[in-house]
């Protein structure tokens, strides 16, 4: 009896579902389904908010926060401040910019041409000296054991010393006594200083190559000075040390003889590929022609002991079309195929790991041009134009034609930046410097401090513009025209944690020169001076060059640049102590670098030189 009512209830329920009611309308075909009603959380005002430990966003422990928006705001604020200063400068002084060079007297231009002629004459004199110094080749089977300097070599060294003095003194005298305009005088002195350093490198490198040629050392790996010492003014050869080293060298030569024969290609044929040279995988000690204890190049660096070569070698290769030729073929300017095969596709990139087993020893010296074939006008002229201060008989060269669009872009950048620097100097720097003269005369310290801080913004702008114009636009354009492959002219010096890193990284041509021709010869046999003495003498030479470069054009030889450069040594010690104390991530060393160099150092030096120049030329 109970089953009947249950069946009846089921029929009534099904009938009610089938009949249309006042409920929601049925969804139309293609329409979106209605959203489900949203359920509320229970006890809304009792929900948990603080559920785990966290740090503040600006806490130093949180390293994943991006400050991109804040940096954008600061850049916009800086831009607004600079625009306000530009408007204020215009309202106060009007337009002060004029075409550069129009105010320079004709006498100054003629004197500048005379200074340039003296520099070129020194290059020709160096070529004549080197041609007269070529010795006869060593006789087969006869090895020279002496390490002293022959009488003919002493004459060559004296002639080079006289020529170096002429290359620096003649333009300096012309600039100091005949050129009134400081900017033009600075250009002449810059050319003279660069030529002086290049001629010194040329003379020192050929001194080593000539000695190896006289000794019959075609592989440039048996330098007797490696085993010499200086005793009572005499060079003494340590035969015991040389014997042990010679035994090791003989074992190495035997192992090399067991390997497959070298492929043809000249003196530089052991370098695996163009990629090694372009990327810098062949280190400085391989690229250099300095044979005095080459291992010293690895550890002794100007201003510190950090490895800069590894940082420079990590730079990527330029995006150029290269043929897969041997390094000797590239250095000699040939474009033949590798190992006698057909020429490779010029658009094909090289494999950096190709033929890795054929790379030479780390301290081997390889050149495509052997001495004395490098003693020629074409070779010396290429070195004079090349963007380097270290002479080599041959350099890594890029295959293929010169990229005209690349050169045009770099030259356009150079021209635009030079115009920008002229505008900044004439419109903003000159009025500030004029005010600094009055501040010094009245001995108003606060006014002078305000002038120096105001000039720091202008000098920093000129510094960055000049750095990009010279080291990136100018040197890259020159390197492209000459097909010079090593384009590492600077590193990221703006991230320097101390002053030592800055002086090593901002100007690699100068760094390599100081390291190759000053630091390493001082700390290596036969002199073997302490590293501290080498650093001191290196900075002393740099200080003298800075004083000549800035003191002579301004007729102000009061030692401002010399003292400023020598003051870098204690500042280097200070910044390195800060790095050891707080760590490189603290940024204290980088802050001291910016303050001492751009905010205080440069503007204060400019004020001193301008004040002296104004007082000497009322």
Image (cartoon, rainbow, N blue to C red):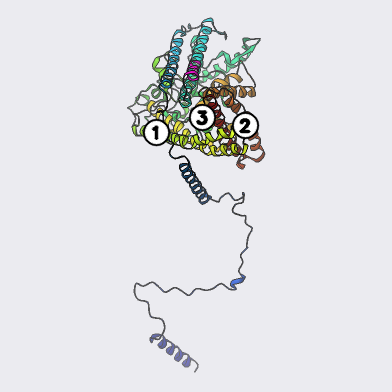
Q: Which region shows up in magenta?
A: 167-178
Quickly name the residue at label 3: 507
Q: Per the image, is 521 magenta?
A: no
Q: Which is more foreground, mark 2 or mark 1? A: 1
Residue at 60% across, 17% down: 525
Residue at 59% across, 33% down: 440
Quickly name the residue at label 1: 415
Query: Residue 31: percent from the left, percent from the top?
Result: 36, 73
Q: Is residue 156 above or below residue 328?
A: above
112 or 382, nearer to the observer: 112
Q: Which residue is the extreme one toward the left?
A: 342
229 or 245, nearer to the observer: 229
Quickly name the residue at label 2: 572
Q: Which residue is the extreme one toward the top?
A: 151
Residue at 60% across, 41% down: 587
Query: Residue 122: percent from the left, percent from the top?
Result: 45, 14
Query: Residue 288: percent from the left, percent from the top?
Result: 50, 22
Q: Dot 1, how many residues are within 10 Å of its Cα: few (below 14), some (14-19), or many (20+)?
A: some
The residues tagged by marks 2 and 1 sit, at their Cα atoms, a distance apart of: 35 Å
Question: Visible in this render: residue 262?
Answer: no
Q: Secondary structure at mark 2?
A: helix
Toward which corner of the image does residue 274 lie, by quadrant?
top left
Q: Earlier in the sequence, mark 2 or mark 1?
A: 1
């Amino acid at each position: 009896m109970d089953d009947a009512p249950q069946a009846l209830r089921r029929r009534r329920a099904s009938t009610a579902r089938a009949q249309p009611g006042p409920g929601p309308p049925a969804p139309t075909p293609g329409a979106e389904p209605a959203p489900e009603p949203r359920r509320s959380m229970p006890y809304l005002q009792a929900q948990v908010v603080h559920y785990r430990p966290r740090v503040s966003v600006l806490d130093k422990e949180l390293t994943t926060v991006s400050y991109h928006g804040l940096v954008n705001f600061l850049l916009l604020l800086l831009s607004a401040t600079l625009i306000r200063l530009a408007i204020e400068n215009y309202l106060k002084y009007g337009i002060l910019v004029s075409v550069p060079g129009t105010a320079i007297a004709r006498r100054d231009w003629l004197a500048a041409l005379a200074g340039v002629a003296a520099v070129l004459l020194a290059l020709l004199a160096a070529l004549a000296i080197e041609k007269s110094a070529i010795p006869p080749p060593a006789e087969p089977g006869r090895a020279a054991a002496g390490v002293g300097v022959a009488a003919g070599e002493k004459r060559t060294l004296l002639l080079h010393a006289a020529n170096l003095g002429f290359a620096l003194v003649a333009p300096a005298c012309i600039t100091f006594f005949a050129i009134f305009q400081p900017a033009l005088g600075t250009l002449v002195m810059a050319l003279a200083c660069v030529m002086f350093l290049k001629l010194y490198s040329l003379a020192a490198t050929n001194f080593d190559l000539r000695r190896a040629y006289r000794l019959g050392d075609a592989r440039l790996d048996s330098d007797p000075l490696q085993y010499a010492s200086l005793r009572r003014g005499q060079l003494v050869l340590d035969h015991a040390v040389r014997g042990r080293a010679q035994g090791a060298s003989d074992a190495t030569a035997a192992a090399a003889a067991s390997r497959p024969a070298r492929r043809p290609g000249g003196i530089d044929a052991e370098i695996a590929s163009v990629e090694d040279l372009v990327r810098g995988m062949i280190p400085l000690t391989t690229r250099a022609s300095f044979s005095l204890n080459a291992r010293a190049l690895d550890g002794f660096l100007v201003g510190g002991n950090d490895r800069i070569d590894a940082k420079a070698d990590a730079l990527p290769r330029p995006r150029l079309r290269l043929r897969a030729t041997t390094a000797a073929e590239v250095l000699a300017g040939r474009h033949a195929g590798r190992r006698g095969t057909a020429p490779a596709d010029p658009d094909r990139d090289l494999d950096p790991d190709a033929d890795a087993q054929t790379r030479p020893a780390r301290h081997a010296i390889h050149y495509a041009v052997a001495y004395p074939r490098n003693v020629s006008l074409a070779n010396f002229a290429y070195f004079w134009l090349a963007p380097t201060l270290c002479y080599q008989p041959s350099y890594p060269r890029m295959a293929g034609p010169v990229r005209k669009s690349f050169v045009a872009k770099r030259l356009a950048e150079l021209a635009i930046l030079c115009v920008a620097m002229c505008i900044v100097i004439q419109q903003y720097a000159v009025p500030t410097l004029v005010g600094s003269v009055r501040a010094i005369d009245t001995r108003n310290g606060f006014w002078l401090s305000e002038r120096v801080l105001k000039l720091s913004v202008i000098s920093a702008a000129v510094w960055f513009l000049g750095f990009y114009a010279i080291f990136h636009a100018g040197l890259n354009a020159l390197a492209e025209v000459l097909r010079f492959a090593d384009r590492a002219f600077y590193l990221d010096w703006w991230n320097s944690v101390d002053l030592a890193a800055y002086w090593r990284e901002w100007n690699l041509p100068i760094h390599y020169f100081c390291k190759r021709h000053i630091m390493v010869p001082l700390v290596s046999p036969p002199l073997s001076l302490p590293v501290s003495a080498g650093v001191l003498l290196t900075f002393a030479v740099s200080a003298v060059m800075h004083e000549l470069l800035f003191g002579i054009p301004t007729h102000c030889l009061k030692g401002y640049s010399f003292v400023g450069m020598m003051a870098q040594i204690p500042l280097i010690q200070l910044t390195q102590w800060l790095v050891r104390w707080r760590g490189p991530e603290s940024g204290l060393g980088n802050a001291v670098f910016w303050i001492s160099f751009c905010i205080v150092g440069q503007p204060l030096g400019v004020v001193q030189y301008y004040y002296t120049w104004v007082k000497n030329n009322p």
